[in-house]
Image (cartoon, grey):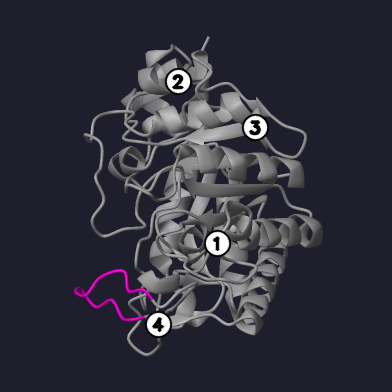
């Protein structure tokens, strides 16, 4: 029996297996945030390869919320049709589809716009990063609306789930950290205030779209005095209370000078286990997970509910078929490919 390749059953989402393709920016959109043929090929190949859940890369809720000028968008109704085509193509091979709604905040390097952030603190003095504009309360309200509008477009495109990007130093992550959020209003200062924007947007998305919500967080920003696992447990508990379905647990990315742990297999997976245990919420584990054996071990140990294979799925779109061969589950291999296994 394979836990990794067995179905995942939840009140709000059902997956044919527990293999997740996490969001990974491809920087292949046109300068208006539109999908290209690359995206259709890239994601459909993983669906054909047997992935249970595909989370489409960071998709901006407004133009200045892109990480780069070649990131996807869902800030306009004209984006919907291409997303609909992608979702339909991947559904045809049995994958469930989510889209990561994102705002890059101060880490945007778009050429024609000024980045925004909770506070006017630049991510870096090099590599094209600009000094961000500190958001006003009215602008924060507008961004909340933009997340909701993008979520509703995702519904129209046929997505099965939404992911809210609150990790890796992008806008919501910047609000969470006391190092990048020095505000003295309702969105800064205390832990409760710093979590407010993420929680408000999560609540709005759950209430308005009706789709299950996954929230991706950086469990620790790897800088002394910054965001850490204890604060992540608090945030995850509040997200659970709101009705979030999954917490997708990564780490780092909010500071240019971070002290990372050694880059070894499963180096981030322990965060997902901690949050799952402390909060009793479903988690997705990440962190240089490359083999079916590693995924099985995480699931058997109670370390997570789903396993994200990022770089491995870039290398091997048919990872699931290799895992099926290891477990003698040839019926899970696409019949047209069986001769290769």
**Residue 216 sits inside the magenta stretch:** no
Instruction: Name the spot of residue 92 as percent of width and height, x first.
Output: 60, 47
Residue indicated by mark 3: 281
Name the N-terminal-most of marks 4 and 1. Answer: 4
Q: Are marks 2 and 3 in contact (CB under 8 Å)?
A: no
Give me the C-alpha separation between circle 4 and circle 2: 40 Å
**Outermost residue, left side:** 126
Residue 203: image location, x then y, percent: 74, 56
SS category of the residue bearing label 1: loop
Give the CA separation, mark 4 to mark 1: 37 Å
SS majority, magenta: loop
Q: Which residues are magenta?
A: 121-131
Q: Earlier in the sequence, mark 4 or mark 2?
A: 4
Residue 36 location, quadrant: bottom left
- Kindly identify the residue that appears in the image at 23 percent across and 56 percent down: 257
Q: Which residue is mark 1?
A: 189
Residue 31 marker: 4
Query: Along the polypeptide, which appears first: circle 2 or circle 3?
Result: 3
């Amino acid at each position: 029996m394979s836990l990794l390749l067995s179905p995942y059953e939840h009140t709000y989402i059902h997956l044919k297996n527990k293999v997740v393709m996490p969001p990974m920016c491809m920087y292949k959109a046109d300068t208006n945030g539109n999908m290209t043929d690359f995206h259709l090929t890239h994601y459909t190949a993983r669906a054909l390869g047997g992935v249970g859940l595909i989370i489409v890369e960071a998709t901006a809720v407004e133009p200045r919320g892109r990480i780069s000028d070649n990131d996807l968008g869902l800030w306009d109704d004209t984006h919907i049709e291409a997303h609909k085509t992608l979702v339909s193509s991947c559904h045809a091979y049995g994958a469930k589809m989510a889209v990561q709604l994102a705002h890059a905040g101060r880490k945007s390097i778009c050429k024609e716009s000024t980045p925004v952030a909770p506070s006017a603190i630049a991510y870096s003095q090099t590599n094209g990063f600009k000094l961000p504009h500190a958001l006003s309360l009215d602008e924060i309200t507008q961004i909340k609306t933009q997340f909701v509008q993008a979520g509703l477009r995702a519904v129209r495109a046929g997505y099965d789930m939404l992911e809210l990007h609150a990790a890796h130093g992008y806008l919501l992550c910047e609000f969470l950290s006391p190092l990048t959020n020095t505000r003295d209003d309702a969105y800064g200062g205390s832990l409760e205030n710093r979590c407010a924007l993420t929680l408000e947007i999560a609540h709005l998305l759950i209430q308005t779209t009706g789709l299950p919500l996954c929230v991706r967080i950086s469990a620790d920003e790897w800088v002394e005095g910054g965001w850490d696992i204890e604060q992540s447990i608090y945030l995850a508990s509040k997200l659970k209370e709101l009705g979030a379905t999954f917490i997708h647990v990564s780490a780092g990315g909010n500071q240019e000078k971070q002290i990372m742990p050694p880059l070894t297999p499963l180096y981030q997976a322990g965060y997902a286990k901690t949050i799952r245990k402390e909060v009793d919420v479903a988690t997705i584990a990440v962190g240089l997970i490359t083999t079916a054996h590693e995924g099985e071990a995480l699931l058997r140990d109670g370390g997570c509910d789903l396993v994200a294979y990022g770089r491995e799925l870039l290398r091997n779109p048919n990872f699931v078929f290799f895992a099926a061969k290891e477990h003698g589950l040839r019926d899970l291999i696409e019949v047209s490919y069986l001769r290769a296994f």
